[in-house]
Image (spheres, grey):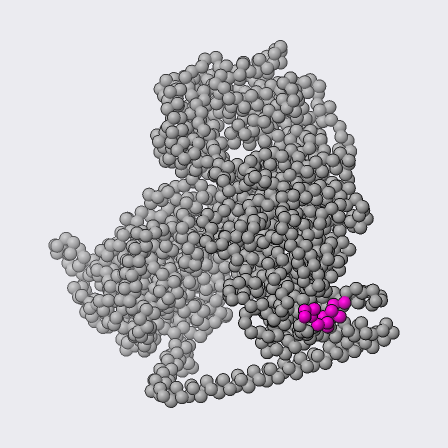
Amino acid sequence: MAAAESDRDPPSALCSEFLNFSAKDTASRWMASVDLQQEVYHHLALYVPRILCLGPSGCSSREEQREEQREELACQLLLLAPLEWLLLGEEPAAGLALLQENNQPSPLCGHVFKVGEPTYSCRECAADPTCVLCMQCFLGSVHKEHRYRMTTSVGGGFCDCGDTEAWKKSPYCQKHTPTPNNRDTEQDPVAQLPADMVARSYNIFSIILKYAVDMLTWEQEELPAGLEPPERGDTYYCMMFNDEVHTYEQVIYTLQKAVNCSQKEAVSFATAVDRDGRKSVRYGDFQFCEQAKSVIVRNTSRQSKPLRVQVMHSSVVAHQCFALKALSWLGQIIQYSDGLRRILCQVGLQERPEGENSSLVDCLMLNDSKMWKGARNMYHQLLMNSLLMDLKYKKIFAIQFAKARMLMVEENLMTTIIRTFVDHLRHRDLQGRFQFDRYTAQQALKFGRVQSLIGDLKYVLISRPCEWSDELREKFLEGLDSFLELLKCMQGMDPVVRQVGQHIEMEPEWEAAFTLQMKLTHIISMIQEWCSTDERVLIDAYRRCLSALSHCYSGLPDGEQPISLSLAGHCVETFRYQVSQDKVSIHLPVCRLLAGLHVLLSRTDVASRFPEQLPLGELSPPLLIELPLRCLVLCAQVHAGMWRRNGFSLINQIYYYHNVKCRVEMFDKDIIMLQAGASMMDPNHFLMIVLSRFELFHIFSSADCRKRYREANKDAVQQNNTLIEEILHLIIMVVGERYVAGVGQVEPFDEVRREIIHQLSIRPMAHSELVKALPENGNKETGLERVIDSVASFKKPGVTGRGLYELRPEWNKHFNLYFHHYSRADQSKAEEAQRKLKRQNGEDTALPPPVPPPLCPLFGSLVNLLQCDVLLAVQGAVLQWAVEPSGGGWTESMLQRVLHLVGMALLEEQQQLENSGRYDDVTFNYTCKITRPGEAPSTSGSVLALLESLQNAPHLEVHKDMITWILKMVANIKTIRERSSSTSSVTISQGQGLEETVRDKDKAERKRKAEMARLRREKIMAQMSEMQKHFINENKELFQQSLEDLEASTSAAAEHSPPSLELSSVAQVCVGPRRLGGTERRQLVTCILCQEEQEVKGHGKAMVLAAFVQRSTVLSKNRRRVLPNAEHHDPLFMHPDLSLGIHTASCGHIMHATCWQRYFEAVQLKEQRRQQRLRGHTSYDVENGEFLCPLCECLSNTVIPLLPHTHTPDHSVDHPGLEVWLKTTSQQIAALHSAHRKQSDDVTEGTEPPVPEGFRIDFTPLNPFSSSISEMITTFSMSTYKVGLKLNPNEQDQRVPVLSWSTCAYSIQAIERLLMDEEKPLFGSLPCRQDDCLSSLTRFSSACWTAAPLKTVHTQFIRLLAALVPDSQVENTPCILDIDMFHLLVYSVLSYSSVHCLDQSRKSVIDSAHLHLLHLVTLAHLVQILLTSTTEEVCMEQDGGGSEEEELTCQFYSTLRQHLGSALPEVTSGWQLWRCVKAGVLPFLRSAALFFHYLNSTAPPPDLLVAGPGQWEALCSYLSLPSNLLLLHQNQDTLLESLLYRWCHHPGIRQTLQGGGAIVRFPRESNQLINLPEDYSILINQASSCMCPRSGGDKSRTPTLCLVCGTMLCSQSYCCQTEVDGEDVGACTAHTFTCGAGVGLFLRVRESQVLFIAGKTKGCFYPPPYLDDYGETDQGLKRGNPLHLCGDRYRKIEHLWRQHSIAEVIGHAQEANQTLVAIDWQHL
């Protein structure tokens, strides 16, 4: 290594050379030289190795940055500046400015996208989904008013604004619209440049581009000729390259071993390799680097091929680095001038002497796969800046690369792609079909790669030609031939055979074939669209497809075993084949393509116009239908359970066959093929073949088929029943599915509309669900938007849920129960929903078939299926079975399908009759046929007779309405047939009359049923009432007791309720000797675990409330404050910025302490067992004392003991004034000081201070609580200590009681803010869980001093009081600007109890002290508010003289100014000062009212139970304060003057006011989450420019926005991991500890997801507040609809945060979804 170092130039030598170097002189020298390339190369050979790559990568990122800056500067001065001088012939800055001035800008935008930048594609105008705009162009274009899709770029593409080929209309935004003068002139921009500059440019660009291309594709040890360094040292780099096989972890582990670096360094190496594609991991002599290489290769070659590592000479690496800088420089230079851009294009595409494909651009493209990522990105960017921005060269480049139509003709691209694709899939079976079952992992990866070829094919076919040339026809059909070859390899692949006897052993591979099918779906559709645009192409394509199919059929056993079938007087020949025994395949792409082309023949009328050109007679229809029919029979048999033993692979294949992704080119086309075959055959023959393939022929051909076929085997009966249902369903589909343009006379619009109607018939659906249910075309469009508003109405969502579309009632009549895209589950849901709807509307519940659209002529004969003899025989048989329902030979579904078919036939007949002028022409006479008896020898009734006999069959109640509808239709058709044209009007009314009589009958029948139901209900109710009476008489004493309890509880409730009139005449007071306590109320509570009821008593069994304690910064006014060191932190004085608090919340569920302990021990035990088994996380951390509430599963980590209410004070005792109380208290404190000194020094010295009468220092008060309650007090104290300080529990620590008081004060402040912001009344609006929590917490806090040593609490009270009443014996008291007054009030009130308990004189009550403390703290707060007020002088003087309040405020303020002088500004407006005081003190007074209300259990006054006026006076009187607070000062003027003097003369005050620290103003504004932009793309745009702070200018992969403070973080990446408490955590988790005390709310911008984090192991995702126009979130930005901020949802998230409910939400989410528990949240 030392040897390597010595080769460096000493920096001083290089520096002096820098200073003496002249770029201008160098350029002049070059200009004069004969061989410019030699000169430039010589210069580069000399300087490049001395500037770049001079040693190992810097250890620290700061060093690395400094090194990079040095290199940049040197490259610019020594290497690029001479080139610029040479190119421009003058000072570069001036020359470039001049070029730019004379340049006409390109109409193309060409902005290259960064990773994660938003891109916009117009769904209406874009040529295909890859045509996109950048944000600036989009906002300036007309497309923002259209339907558009928004996505985030993966980086590297560019904006298509100005490219006329990319847009159907409006290709320009406002900025890039060409001006009239430059739109027409297609002049050469090179002509605008001076001739000598043009010549120089050609020269320089050729040299530099060749240099860059050579260096980036260089693979040898020695440098190219002319670039050899003057002296070649032994300095090498060990360069590691990226691959797709090895994981981050493998690379990090290997590097640590190979180059002996720390994990952090290895992570940064791995990140750089991933980002740039390569990274040097070692620098030194050859031996040293080679050694690292061998370790890396050895370590990574075990499972797969090793990582690519190369040892490269430092000069080669240096030149490669400069080559990238040179490409970047070229890209920048050509931005200044279109002329230079064109010159660079010419240089790049110029063929070199080597022959074809030898230009520099060709060379780059051919070597693309050999380059590393950084180099690839750089040259791609240059190509985009040059070739793709020049309209002329763009086309030339496209021919080099791939331009669809031209290539289709000139380069025969389609054939080339398909043949390449087929060549790569080499595994074939004997018939030449693809075989995917023997794929290794490597081949599977390759198969994935090969599929991208299909994507290329899609771009070739994406836009259909408007006019065809003969050449294009020829090449397209040639391409189609090769495509048919591909389809022939797929025809019949993955065949299956039914397993009989035993289950299949190995699931066969099926996914690859379906992946291929899905990829080809759009291609097949596009090929059909191309064919539809030209008749000659269509006819030719049809012929070729037919011959390909004949080739496939040549393998069928045609005529091997011919059999003859006869049924209902008809005979047909077919051959023996059984799906249940022979091979069958679900893949039939050739058949299906032919079906598609057949429909096009019908749609374009080619079939009727050129029948002589079509080979329609060549293939027999029975063969056409054979393979699709087998496929449908396979589905039916799988549904009938005959293929159970074939495992899941077959079930999955059937699922995808029907699934929306594949069905267009699979299931749908099979139905069409059957329709095409049926329309060309005798309908009876068609049905007999279908029956034969379904293996049901024997059932219907037997002579007594109507008598019910009986089978001993129950399974066989069930299977046959299902198959009969399936065959009937198939017939319904073949005749009834006409919504394909070409089969029925419909438009594509009708087809989409029908899909939507049937989806919405199941239930109202969200937009995204509808989109998923519809097939997409190649442009990812479904056609939904054009249709949806006509058939559905939209219902907006609330705060949760999503917007839903509901079907408009007038479309219900189009509902078809046997819609062919319904799954079975959908069908039953839809049926249920439709019947329910009909019942609600009071209609009959029949679901008749809807009126079908007419068929196209080519498919016209399909209707004859409905009236053919075979179908009538089947219908007759099923109806006959239904008449005699014994045994299991039929099902209701079968009957329902037969009724549906009968209905379809009647509708068909009615339509034909109505549409034809003369009835003699109508060939469809179904009604005549159903009145004839069956053909079978037995003279059983006709179909109609059977229907009539079924009408009132009791076992067919459900179908009664449908049968009635059918009989009504038959009657209608009869009347139509009978009437003559003259009496048409009369007979219509007769028809209606008949309908009405039937309807009346129906109504009467319904009424009778309803009456019977009512009577039955009444009878049941009477019986129940009788039983109840009987039960009460038997259990009298029980009921007596419960009645008494009820009375007792109502009287207790009356006590709880607001005071009645007598009480309210006395003002309600919650503090001071006049207050009323709550001891009169008994507190009865029930344990949720053992259900035992108990009264809360001080000496009773402890009852506890499940609670959750957490650190909080929700109220923080200073998030930058560094968290104090827990060991030495003194929490006695809370700073007014509330930078860190402890919050307690509870779910309100109560348990016995013993029950809870048993429960918690069980949880611990279970956790130990689980850890041994699973080693995973749970949603709660038992080691930290967490558990779930046994009742509501709310996250908890401690319990609060319940304590009894306080007593009402003794009103007979004196109430000393403030002065007397202060004097007594200071004496007591002096006595305590003296006693403490004695204990510590063991000496008595000086005089003892006087001890007040009855004050006993040595008195030890009795503990008022039982041992179990004391234990629970300690438990909760320890929890707050542990959470608040993040220390292990320590009961001896003096800070324990302070933290308990702290959580009480902070929780009350948080609730008060919440109520204030939501404008709710102070009392009465809290949910009972929060009310119970605050009540228990306050009473606990008042008692927690009993669990601490008295001396500790005394010391704390003395220090607290010293902040208000300065005490010479107490040092380091903070100034009043540094104390939060509410915390001070709570702490001093709660700690005073420890002093008062020593006073045995019984002369005063503790409440007097509480009142005086409140007065003192309130006054201090007023001073605090006035000192920090920012009142600007306003000229708006109030009317008349100021009120008393204003005058006193002015006086008070001037007193403060006397003490502080110029530190306080002069303010004369008393009105303004008073307003400022009143607003500032209100939160404090409200919090104090809550505190004393819970502490003393005093009922609140009525005025505070409602929001509205009169709050101030009610609040002041409730707190025993004058409503003019300044009277507090006025009344005790002399006493308080000395206090004011001391407060104001504290050194901290003047320092703070003169800018020595941040001043907290009052009232403190409530914190809110940050403001988010209304449009989500603004956020995406911000995130796309978010750099990762650690990886040298790299873009952040997962930018994540903190919703609390607005910081954008680089989440979920190795680069930004930091260490917290000895553990590596991601950026978000680390941020939560500084910003949210462990709780964080983030928005993952690229995923559009809100992320909640609590601690290191807990987190969940939450729906974002951004919705699209359909009221849905788009997590993952998959749909791309524009998103806008929903205020209500954002407020809900903010409310969760303010309520401190984030941890609770995470707990519930993790309990509901166990996969969330497994995520490593700490790495986000």
Query: Does residue 1206 sit above or below 151 in this rendering?
Result: below
Q: Is residue 3 left or right of residue 1317?
A: left
Residue 1464 visible: no
**Residue 928 percent location from the top left of the image:** 75, 70
Judge by depth and name the residue closer to the eye, 192 or 1339. Answer: 192
Residue at image point 27% right, 52% down:
1288
Residue at image point 78% right, 49% down:
607
Judge by depth and name the residue closer to the eye, 789 or 1637. Answer: 789
Residue at image point 27% right, 69% down:
1102
**Residue 1052 percent location from the top left of the image:** 37, 79
**Residue 1664 percent location from the top left of the image:** 52, 54
Question: Residue 928 in magenta?
Answer: yes
Residue at image point 66% right, 58% down:
565
Question: Residue 1040 in magenta?
Answer: no
Query: Does residue 1149 sit above or below 70 in this rendering?
Result: below
Q: In which quarter of the image is residue 1406?
A: bottom left
**Residue 724 percent location from the top left of the image:** 60, 63
Q: In this view, does 1495 lie to the left or right of 1368?
A: right
Q: Quadrant of residue 1398?
A: bottom left
Q: In this view, does 1685 lie to the left or right of 1364?
A: right
Judge by depth and name the residue closer to the eye, 214 or 1104. Answer: 214
**Looking at this rendering, what residue extends furthest in the left direction?**
1243
Judge by depth and name the residue closer to the eye, 992 or 1570. Answer: 992
Q: Which portion, as a residue range, is magenta?
A: 925-937
